[in-house]
Image (tube, rainbow, N blue to C red):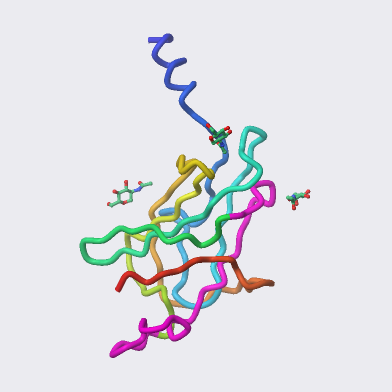
Amino acid sequence: MIFFFLLSLATIVSALTLTGPTESNGWTQSGDQMVTWTPDSTDPSTIVIKLIIPLPNIRQPQILSNNVNTSEGSYIWNQPNPSDFNGANVGYAPQTVLQPGDEYEILLVNHNGTQLAASNFTVSTGTSTVTATAQASYAFIPTK
Ligand SMILES: *[C@@H]1O[C@H](CO)[C@@H](O)[C@H](O)[C@H]1NC(C)=O
Ligand SMILES: *[C@@H]1O[C@H](CO)[C@@H](O)[C@H](O)[C@H]1NC(C)=O
Ligand SMILES: *[C@@H]1O[C@H](CO)[C@@H](O)[C@H](O)[C@H]1NC(C)=O
């Protein structure tokens, strides 16, 4: 028993703890949104933050930022306006990328693609009170 326990511990590559968004602490539909975690000394110095926006039959992660300072413990996503994306607005004009619903997922990943933490969460109606201070370096590509 102890042997197997130690073996499984050895496969943990990082001890950062995702604190938001989580299943009990989600995002709101409008405004900029915050990702928070408790860093650990074993973490890589920078991480990649990805978001899965649930679509029928598709769970494709989008990169929100590929160069986040892990020690900061937080990242504010400057939510883009859908009309900023060529073609994304044809025949359908949502005011925000985020729509109220379940099964959104946030993923904290190292630069080798190893997942450090992840959580599903809910987007509810309402507007966040956080504001990004700089344009985020996301590469958001709506799938549909
Ligand atoms: C990362 O954040 C920490 C804590 O705020 C800071 O001390 C450090 O200088 C930052 N590193 C870089 C490369 O910006
Ligand atoms: C990624 O893989 C390279 C090569 O195996 C390794 O040197 C590096 O430490 C890894 N980086 C992270 C963040 O795990
Ligand atoms: C989030 O939900 C999806 C779909 O139900 C599931 O495949 C995935 O494992 C869940 N992620 C976490 C971190 O629980």
Q: Quick check: is 95 in the magenta stretch? A: no
Viewer-nearest residue: 7 or 90: 90
Quadrant of the drawing holding the N terminus:
top left
Q: Residue at x 36, y 73 (%)?
A: 100
Viewer-nearest residue: 37 or 93: 93
Rendering coords of residue 105 (x, y %): 39, 56
Quadrant of the drawing holding the C terminus:
bottom left
| Image-based side of 100 in relation to 126, left or right | left
Magenta-drawn segment: 67-94
Rendering coords of residue 96 (x, y %): 43, 80
Q: Quick check: is 87 in the magenta stretch? A: yes
Ligand 2 resides in the quarter of the picture at top right
Check the image and report above or below for 113 versus 139. above
Q: Residue at x 38, y 62 (%)?
A: 122
Viewer-nearest residue: 128 or 6: 6
Check the image and report above or below for 60 versus 124. above
Q: In the current view of this chain or complex, which residue is farthest to the left?
A: 57
Rendering coords of residue 37 (x, y %): 58, 49
Rendering coords of residue 55 (x, y %): 27, 66
Q: Residue at x 66, y 43 (%)?
A: 45
Q: Residue at x 66, y 51 (%)?
A: 69
